[in-house]
Each structure stands twice: as structure tokens, then as C-alpha cells.
Image: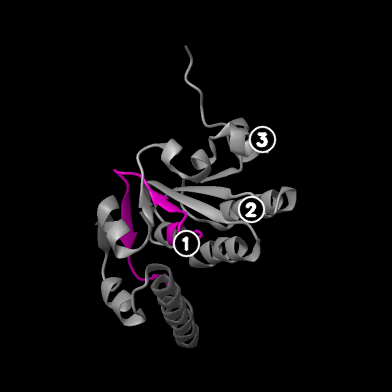
Amino acid sequence: MAEMALTPGVFDRLLSDRIIWLGSEVRDDNANEICAKILLLAAEDSQRDIFLYINSPGGSITAGMAIYDTMKFVPNDVVTVGIGLAASMGQFLLSSGTKGKRYITPNARVLLHQPSGGFGGTAADIQTQAKVILDMKKRMAELTAEQTGKSVEQILIDNDRDNWFTAQEALAYGFVDHLREFASDVVGGGGTDDSVNKK
């Protein structure tokens, strides 16, 4: 029996069940697609949950913030599920789900660290770019503090270097609300419950 590849058709099928999959770095192209899918699902039904599955090593801050802003822009609850890896911007998006509806699977890992970026150009350009990164670091620390219940000062201490968390540690830290092994234990069956999805 041939193995089913993750073709666009698979992702379309997931979308029909209100599931959005982030399984790579966060980039401008896939962030635009994820934002569009969130808006589409909200337009189809402004009451039902949207499920965002995350297995991501992180990526672009600005692209990630576009996803974050879209998650907050729509009236729907956004259920986040961390599977495999939620690092850097992946961690931030996992924690950005609707409080009470943020999940992680038992063998997933989470990485918290400060934003980084490569600089180039004139001295004035580099100074401007450094200020942008510092502003983003402060803003992300403020939002992460809100998401986890920690102080901004604590977040800045904890994200100063790469800080890895097991699923249990991520739950204790406040990145997520639940550690679950099975989709049936996630609200709405994690998007797999036909009785919920076909309403």
C-alpha cells in the first residue's frame, strides 16, 4: 500500500475540518497562507474553534507576528497544539492560543529564547536594525508574560539564552494549559471530531 504524502490535498482536507498545520519555519509565504486560512475559517463560521497545529523550529519575527495578530483579530477561539517542536516563534504561537485551549503532546519540546537577526549596511543602518530587534524583544517578552503569568523581568531572564522545556515543564511554565496524548482529549477532538466539525 502506497504511503500518503503530505500533498496540498491533504492540507485542504485538514482545512475542511478547521485544522491549520504549521510544520516548518515561519516565513512570509506560509505566514500569509496561515493568516488567509484563519480569516477564511472565521468568515465561514465565527463561532467554531480554529485548530492550529505547530511543529516548527521558529523563524521570522514579523511573519510570526502577522499570524499572532490574525489569531487575535478574529472572534473565534484558536486552539493550539504543539507536536514535536515548538521553538522560538513556534513557542510564541503555541502560547498565543486561546487560554484554556493550548495543548502539547507528551514528547514535544519547547524552546524559549530572545529574538535574533543578522545586520548589514552602514553603521546607521545597523544601529536602526538593532533598535528594531530590541523593541521586538521587549514586545515579545510583554506578550509572553501575559500568556504565561510570569513577569516581564522573569521572561527576559529566562529567554537570555536558549531555554529548553519538556512538555511537562512547558505546562508548568504556563506556555500551555494541557498535556494530552490523544486527540479525543483535546477540545473538539482536536479538530478530528466529526460530530463537532459538521455542525
* Dot 3: element: loop
Residue that mark 2 sits on: 38
Q: How far apart are marks 2 and 3 (CA)?
A: 18 Å
- Vertical relation: 153 (above or below) 26: below
Going from N to C along the chain, the mark reached first, 2 or 1, is: 2
Q: What residue type is labelled 2?
A: Ile
Q: Which quadrant is the C terminus positioned in?
A: top right
Going from N to C along the chain, the mark reached first, 2 or 3, is: 2
Mark number displayed over residue 198: 3
Is 132 or 171 nearer to us in this picture?
Answer: 171
Q: Is residue 74 left or right of residue 186?
A: right
Residue 21 position, x and y percent, is 52, 44
Membership of 37 in magenta stretch: no
Mark number displayed over residue 99: 1
- Tell me whether circle 2 and circle 1 mark residues in contact (CB < 8 Å): no
Residue 160 position, x and y percent, is 28, 74
